[in-house]
Image: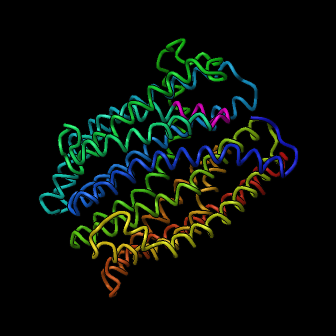
Amino acid sequence: MKQTYTKPQKIRLLFYILIPILITQLSMYAMTFFDVMMSGQYSTQDVAGVSIGSSLWTPVYTGLSGILIALTPVVSQLIGSRKFKSVSYSVMQAVYLALALALVILIVGAFCLNPILTAMNLEDNVHRVAHDYLIALSFGIIPLFVYNALRAFIDALGQTRISMVITLGALPVNVIFNYLFIYGKFGFPELGGVGSGYATAITYWIIALTAILVVLKIHPFSTYDVFREFFRVSLKEWRALLSIGVPIGLAIFFETSIFSAVTLLMSKYDTVTIASHQIAMNFASLLYMMPLSMSMALTIVIGYEIGAARYKDAREYSFIGITLALMMSLVLSAILFFFREPVASAYTKDHAVMLLTSHFLIYAIFFQISDALQAPIQGILRGYKDVNVTFAMSLVSYWILGLPIGYFFAKYTDMGAFGYWIGLISGLALGAIGLAARLRFIQQVKFKKLA
C-alpha cells in the first residue's frame, strides 16, 4: 500500500488491488459454479440437489466467514498508522477464531441438516443428493475458514495478486476432481452431484496449505512473523474482532440467506422450476462478484487512508469506487440480457429447464444496479469500521420488507415463482438507498470536521 495524491493515481491503485480480488472471487465462486454446471450435465435431479445444498451452505459460509473480514480493516488501519508489530498478533487471533467458527458449523450442521432438508419436502433423490453433497463439502470447512483469515491478512497489505494466484491455481484442480468424482472416470467412484462436494473439499485443503506456506516464506508476509509464535487465545482480541466482524457477518447473512429462504419457499414447485431458479441465481451471483470485489478493494484503501487520518482521500476513493461499479453494472446487465439463452444452455441440456432459466435471468438484470450501489458502500463503511447500522439495514430491507413483498407477489398474483424475484429486487434496492444515506452521514457529518 502507498499514499496517492491525484485521482489518476487513486484509480490506478484501486484497479491494481481490485482486479486480483475480482479474479480471486471469480475463482472461488467458480468452484460452486462448476459444481452446479457439471452436476447439471449429469442429471436434472443432481443439479437440483447440489443447487439446494449450495444455497443452504452459502449464507452460512458467507455470514460466518464475513466475521473474518473484520481482520482486513483492522490490519489496514494498523499498517496505515504504522503499528506493524501488532499485525502478527491480530492475524493469529483471527486464525484461532476461524478454527472456532468452523467447529461451530460442523457441530450445528450435524444436528440441523436432516431436519431442514426434511422440512423442504423434496423428491427423495434430490434430498439424498443435497444431504450427501453437504456432508462431502464439510470435510473442507476447517481449511476454508483458515484460508479466509489468511486471505484477509494478505489482501490488507494490498498484495491481492497473491490471493489471486492461489485460488486461480486451485480452480483447475477443482474441475479435474469434479470430472473424476461426478462421472466416475479413471477408476474413481461415480458419485454424481455428490462427487462435486468431495472435489471442492479437496480444493479447500490445497488453497489453505498454500496460503500458510506463502505467509511463512514469501516477502512481505514473512516479515510479520505470522505462525512464528503461537500466542495464547485472547478473548479481548476476539471481542475486538467480533465487534466489527459480527455486524459484517450478520449483514452478509441477512442478504445471502434471503436467497436461501426463497429457495425453501419455492420447494413447493416442481423440480424443473427449482433447477431453473437455482441456475439463474447461480449465474446472477457470479456477476455479483464484480461489485463484491469492488467492495473488498474499497475496504482496503479506505481503511488504509482512515488509519493514516487522510479523510479527504477516503472520500475521493469512495466516489471513484461507486462510479466505477455503476458503470460496470451497465455492461454486466447488457451481457445478461443478450446472452441469457447461451448461459442457460451451458448449465443444462433439459429444454424445459433451459427455457425457464432464460426467463429468470431477465429478472436478474435488475439485481445489477442495486448491487453496484449497495456492495461498494458496504465496503466503504467497513473501511470506516462503521458496521452496526449496515447490519440493521440489511435485516430491515431484506427480511422485513423484501421477503414479504416477494411472498405477496408469488402467492396473491399470477406471477408465481417470479414473484419471489420481485421481492429480492425490492430488498436490494431498499438496502442500497439506506446504505447511501448512511454513507452520506458518515462522510458529511461524522468525519467532515476531521478532514
Q: Residue at x 40, y 54 (%)?
A: 33
Q: Residue at x 60, y 47 (%)?
A: 296
Among the 4 quarters of the image, the one containing residue 257:
bottom left
55 to the left or right of 67: left
Q: Is residue 362 above or below residue 285?
A: below
- In the picture as drawn, the residue positioned furthest to the top comes out as 229
Q: Is residue 68 above or below residue 281?
A: above
Q: Residue at x 67, y 36 (%)?
A: 158
Q: Residue 156 colored magenta?
A: yes
Residue 433 appears in the picture as rendered? no
Q: Residue at x 56, y 23 (%)?
A: 215
Q: Main secondary structure of the magenta part?
A: helix
Residue 58 appears in the picture as rendered? yes
Q: Nearer the viewer, residue 270 or 405?
A: 270
Q: Is residue 235 above or below residue 264?
A: above
Q: Nearer the viewer, residue 403 or 284?
A: 284
Q: Which residues are magenta?
A: 150-160
274 to the left or right of 203: left
- Image coords of residue 273 (percent x, y): 28, 72
- Image coords of residue 136 (percent x, y): 25, 40
- In the picture as drawn, the residue positioned furthest to the bottom comes out as 414
- In the picture as drawn, the residue positioned furthest to the front comes out as 186
